[in-house]
């Protein structure tokens, strides 16, 4: 039976440690520092929590919610690292933390270069850490794919052009050294994406959006997850159609597949309009 009196010292300990760690580092901490794992001393604290680890996570969640309500996103980014440490196998924790870094904290930065560091930190958190600890999780694949589609590839951020230039340089650099797998891009899967959806420009974020969504479909079993991943795919292909008409038929095919799996009136209307616009049957 849960004993609140016995749990209190442990919860207080982790709450104080988390709060102290965040305050010590300050709002000017670099993205790479914020997303780094807590210190060995912090690891000892968490290990000592034992069965109270879940309660400690609730304390940190409560504090994180307060910081978000107050718009204190930089502090939230630091504190949220503790959530990934306390609940490493909860996909929503990784998605929450990465979204905050890439969308909320980044736009507070004064320059495009500063913004990119936070966006890149969000990408790496999902790709290198979240998926490493939760391989095959469709939620994390979906979040990573959306980030490439919307944050890097879309018009949501005025610094989008800078992000795309940075991503292009990263891909080209690893292409030259033959180390694309360091950013998660496996040659066999890249070839499969080219074959299924049309040859991609792999230096553009849209290609990565398709890549990660397709990877998510490999392991997605729930209808909701499959529908969300297919939405990323057909929306990415629709965006690519704006510059290259050759993607139109592929986009329509994906919409039809998505509709067959999970019919919706909205998707049906989108298909009808898309067919009319591009003269498709």
Image: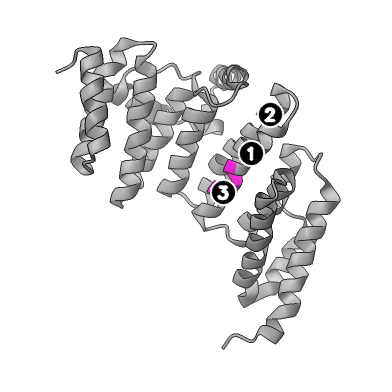
Identify the residue under disc 1: 104
Q: Is residue 82 left or right of residue 244?
A: right
Label 3 vs 2, first from the N-terminus: 3
Q: Is residue 188 visible?
A: no
Residue 134 image position (x, y, % from top left): 49, 52
In what element is the residue under mark 2? helix
| Tag shown at residue 96 | 3
The N terminus - image quarter: bottom right
Q: Is residue 59 left or right of residue 225?
A: right
Magenta part of the protein: which range? 95-99
For the stretch drawn in magenta, what is the main secondary structure? helix
Residue 92 vertical placement versus 207 (above, below)? below
Q: Is residue 81 left or right of residue 123?
A: right
Q: Residue at x 70, y 53 (%)?
A: 67
Report the residue that reaches farthest toward the right.
Answer: 24
Residue 40 image position (x, y, % from top left): 77, 59
Q: Residue at x 44, y 47 (%)?
A: 139
Q: Residue at x 50, y 23 (%)?
A: 153
Identify the residue under disc 2: 115
Residue 118 image position (x, y, % from top left): 67, 34
Mark 2 neighbour class, 10 Å CA radius: few under 14, some 14 to 19, many 20 or more: many
Label 1 vs 2, first from the N-terminus: 1
Q: CA distance from mark 3 to mark 2?
A: 18 Å
Q: Is residue 194 left or right of residue 141?
A: left
Residue 117: which quarter of the image? top right
Q: CA distance from mark 1 to mark 2?
A: 10 Å
Label 1 vs 3, first from the N-terminus: 3
Q: Nearer the viewer, mark 1 or mark 2?
A: 1
| Tag shown at residue 123 | none
Residue 102 image position (x, y, % from top left): 61, 36
């Amino acid at each position: 039976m849960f004993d609140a009196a016995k749990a209190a010292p442990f919860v207080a300990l982790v709450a104080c440690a988390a709060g102290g760690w965040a305050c010590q580092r300050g709002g000017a901490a670099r993205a790479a520092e914020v997303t780094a794992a807590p210190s060995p001393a912090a690891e000892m604290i968490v290990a000592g929590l034992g069965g109270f680890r879940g309660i400690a996570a609730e304390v940190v969640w409560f504090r994180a919610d307060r910081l978000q309500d107050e718009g204190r996103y930089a502090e939230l980014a630091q504190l949220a690292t503790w959530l990934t440490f306390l609940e490493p196998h909860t996909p929503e924790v990784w998605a929450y933390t990465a979204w905050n870094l890439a969308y909320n904290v980044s736009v507070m930065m004064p320059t495009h270069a500063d913004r990119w560091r936070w966006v890149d930190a969000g990408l790496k958190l999902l790709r290198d850490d979240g998926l490493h600890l939760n391989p095959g999780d469709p939620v994390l694949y979906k979040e990573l794919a959306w980030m490439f589609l919307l944050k890097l590839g879309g018009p949501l951020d005025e610094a989008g052009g800078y992000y795309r230039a940075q991503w292009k340089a990263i891909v080209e650099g690893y292409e030259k050294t033959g180390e694309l797998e360091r950013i998660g891009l496996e040659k066999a899967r890249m070839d499969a994406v080219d074959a299924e959806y049309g040859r991609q420009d792999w230096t553009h974020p849209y290609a990565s959006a398709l890549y990660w969504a397709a990877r998510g479909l490999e392991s997605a079993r729930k209808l909701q997850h499959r529908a969300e991943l297919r939405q990323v795919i057909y929306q990415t292909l629709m965006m690519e159609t704006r510059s290259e008409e050759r993607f139109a038929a592929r986009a329509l095919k994906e919409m039809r597949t998505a509709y067959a799996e999970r019919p919706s009136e909205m998707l049906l209307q989108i298909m009808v309009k898309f067919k009319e616009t591009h003269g498709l049957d």
